[in-house]
Image (cartoon, grey):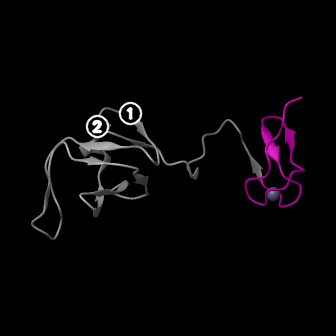
Amino acid sequence: MESIPNCPICQSQHTYQDGSLYICPECAHEWDPNETSSDTDVLQVKDSNGNLLADGDDIILIKDLKLKGSSTVLKKGAKAKGIRLVEGDHEIDCKIDNMKVMLKACFVKKA
Ligand SMILES: [Zn+2]
């Protein structure tokens, strides 16, 4: 038997299928499981090679990067361990040389 996911709005388990839609009787939410919703909270961040990055990955800088607001330059080849992905313009939250930095995924590659 096909299992129907819990309601994404109220987490009710009493969801049922009607045609191509799933329906929640508790909060009246209807959704199409085949529709890739844009409000999914799965963050997809790709490095310069197009590889998907994940929390906890190690990355390597592929070019020198000047840190905004300082004279510090992060060197090409510098490694960051255990990155954290965040939403926004700079998707990678990590530490390089004990400095907390935010990096753009296009300037790194997976180690
Ligand atoms: Zn619901």
Tag 2: Cα neighbours inside 10 Å, few (<14), some, or many (≥20)?
Answer: some
Q: Identify which amino acid the numbered label 2 is placed on.
A: Ser
Which quarter of the figure has residue 3? top right
What residue is shown at x 32% (from left), y 43% (from top)?
Answer: 59
Secondary structure of the residue carrying tag 1 is loop
Q: Identify which amino acid the numbered label 1 is placed on.
A: Asn
Q: Main secondary structure of the magenta part?
A: loop
Is residue 77 positioned above or below 86 on the image?
A: above
Marks 2 and 1, how far apart in space?
7 Å
The residue that disc 1 covers is: 51
Residue 105's disc is none
Residue 99, position in %: x, y? 26, 63
What residue is shown at x 36% (from left), y 49% (from top)?
Answer: 81
Which quarter of the figure has residue 36? top right
Residue 60, position in %: x, y? 26, 42
Is residue 97 positioned above or below 17 on the image?
A: below
Q: What's drawn in magenta, residue-wise? A: 1-29
Q: Which quadrant: the N terminus?
A: top right
Residue 4 among magenta residues: yes
Q: Is residue 35 left or right of 87 when viewed as pictured?
A: right
Q: Is residue 39 left or right of 8 when viewed as pictured?
A: left
Tag 1: Cα neighbours inside 10 Å, few (<14), some, or many (≥20)?
Answer: few
Which quarter holds ligand 1? bottom right
The residue that disc 2 covers is: 48
Residue situated furthest top in the rendering: 1
